[in-house]
Amino acid sequence: MIRFIVLGIACILMVCSPALAAELDQPNIVLIYGDDIGYGDLGCYGATGIPTPNIDQLAAEGLRFSSAYCTSATCTPSRYSLLTGEYAWRREGTGIAPPNSPALIESGRTTLASILKKSGYSTGIVGKWHLGLGKPPKPDWSGLIKPGPLEIGFDYCFLMPTTNDRVPCVYVENHQIVGLDPKDPVDVFMKNPDGQPSGQTHREVLKMDWSHGHYDSIVNGISRIGFMVGGHDARWVDEDMSDVFISKAKEFIDQNSDQRFFLYFSSQSIHVPRAPNSRFVGSTHHGPRGDAVVEFDSCVGEIVDTLRDHGILDNTLLLITSDNGPVLDDGYQDQAEEKLGAHKPAGPFRGGKYSNFEGGTRVPLIVSWPGRLQPGVSDALISQIDFAATLKTIANSNMEIGSSAIPDSLDLSKVLLGVTSSGRDYVVEHAGSLSIRKGDWKYIEPSSGPAMNLDTNTELGNSQKPQLYNLANDPGESKNLAPDFPTQLAEMQKVLAEIRDSPHHQGTTSTGN
C-alpha cells in the first residue's frame, strides 16, 4: 500500500513540476485580466447574487488562490508591473496614464511578452492597454502609433488605447486606428479645442449621466475624460465592446491553434462606464456593475469553448485575475451603490480601488490547466509581479536575462501549479503609499494623504501614524496594533525599507523550488 502511495505522489510531482511539465507538453498560456473586479465579485469567492458559472467551474477544476495580489491599487501601475516584473513605484511617470501618454515601457525591454516570444510563442494582446503609446510628446493618432505592444514582445495587438472612460474612443490594431477615414483625422486634447458639446454643456442628452470628473467629449451618448476630434466612423460603441474584443481573441486563437501561443486578454469589464450588451442587462439585481461581471464571465466561457473546439484546452494554462480592487461610483451614475444590496465586492476586506487596505490589491486568481493541476485552494502568497519569471519557467524558456530584467519577479512556478504552498515571504502593496504583508502581518507606512476618496466613497487607508494589522485575526484591518507590537512593527519597517532602497531586492523570499 505504501509503495502505491509513494508512486502516486511521484507521478503527481512529475506531472506538476514545471520543467518536466514543459518538457512533456509546453502549454499555451492565456492570461485573462479583469478590470476593477474585486475579491468578492465572483461566485467562487463568495458572491451569491452575481452568477459566474464559467469562472466558478474553472476554479472548481483548478486552483483558487486566497492570497493573490496585484501590485498597485490602480490600473496603469499594476499593468506595468505585470509585464515588466518591476514595481511601478520604482519608476517615475507610471501613475494612471492620461489620454495622450507616450509609451511607458521602452522599446526592446524584456517583458513577459518578449520572454515568451523568444521561447517560441506567438504572442498577442486584445483589450485594454493603458500603458501609453507612441513617442513624446504624444501619439500620432492619425498616423503610425508606435512604439507600443509590438515593440515590447507582442506579435499582434488589438487595443483600447487608454480606458473606456477616456478619449480617444477608438480601437487600435497593431500601429493604426481601426476604420479611420484619412479625411477625418483624430487628435486628443485636455481642453475643448473647438467648442464641441460636452458632458457639462449638454448634460441633458447623455444616456448615462456622470457623477464626477467625466464630463468632456461625448461619444456614444456618454461623456469622457478629455476631448477628441475626428475619427467619427472609427468610434466605438460601448455596448458592443466585449463582443469586439472576444471576437478578436477568438480570431487570434483560431490563427495560432497549431502552434504555441500566449494571449493576454485584457478585458474592459467592469471598468466605468459600465455599459454591458443588452443580452446581459438585468442578469443581476445589482444594475450595470453586476451585469458587467456576468458579461465578463461569459467572455471567459467563450475563450474556454474556443480552446476546447480546437482540441487544445487540455494543453492550455489559463489565469484569471484583476488589475486592482473594486469601486462602486467611479464617475458615473449607474446605481452601483444604490443596487449593491448585501453584495460585498471586496469580500471580507476593507477598502477597494485606490486604497492601501487589502481591498485595493488583494484580488481573485484562478489557475486552470486541465489534467495537470490538482483542484484546490492555495493560501500561498503570490503577486502578479511574479508572472514574468513564473511563466518563463512554465514555458520551459532557456532565455538568458540580465539581473536588471524583471528585477522584482520571482519564479513561483511550483506555487502556481500547486506543487507547493510555500510562496513569497512578503508582498508589497502600493496605493498612495507602500504597504507590506509578511505572513499574517500587514504594515502600512505613514502618509499625509486623505483618509477618504470622497468622490468614490473609498477608505484610502492613509494615516500619519504607522499602521500594523494581523490579517489572520483581523482581515478587515479594523484594529491598529502598531502601539502594542513595537518589535514586529520595527521588523516590518526594516524589510520595507530594504526593498525600497534596493532596485533588485528579492530578500529571503522562497521561490517555491
Image: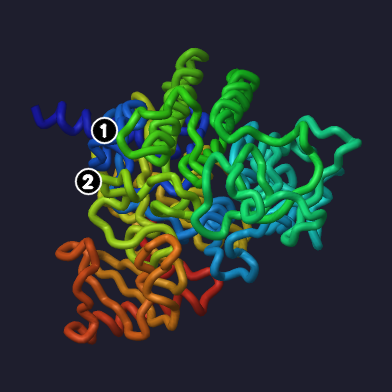
Q: Give the residue furthest to the right.
A: 183
Looking at this view, is 48 or 261 the one in front? Answer: 48
Name the residue rendered at 50%, 62% in the picture: 408
Q: Amino acid at mark 2?
A: Ala
Residue at horizontal 50%, vertical 28%?
A: 277
Residue 360 in sight from this viewpoint: yes
Q: Is residue 482 left or right of residue 364?
A: left
| 404, 29: nearer the viewer | 29
Mark 1: which secondary structure? loop
Task: Please provide percent x and percent y for residue 113.
Answer: 62, 43
Residue corresponding to mark 2: 342
Q: Quadrant of the N terminus?
A: top left
Cα–Cα gap, marks 1 and 2: 29 Å
Q: Which residue is denoted by mark 1 in the rendering?
A: 375
> Judging from the image, what secondary structure is the residue with disc 2 in?
loop
Relative to residue 177, is residue 158 drawn left or right? left
Q: Nearer the viewer, residue 93 or 154?
A: 93
Judging depth in this view, the residue of 129 and 338 nearest the camera is 338
Q: Nearer the viewer, mark 1 or mark 2?
A: 2
Mark 1, residues whose alpha carbon is within 10 Å: few (<14), some, or many (≥20)? some
Which of the 4 image quarters holds residue 279?
top left
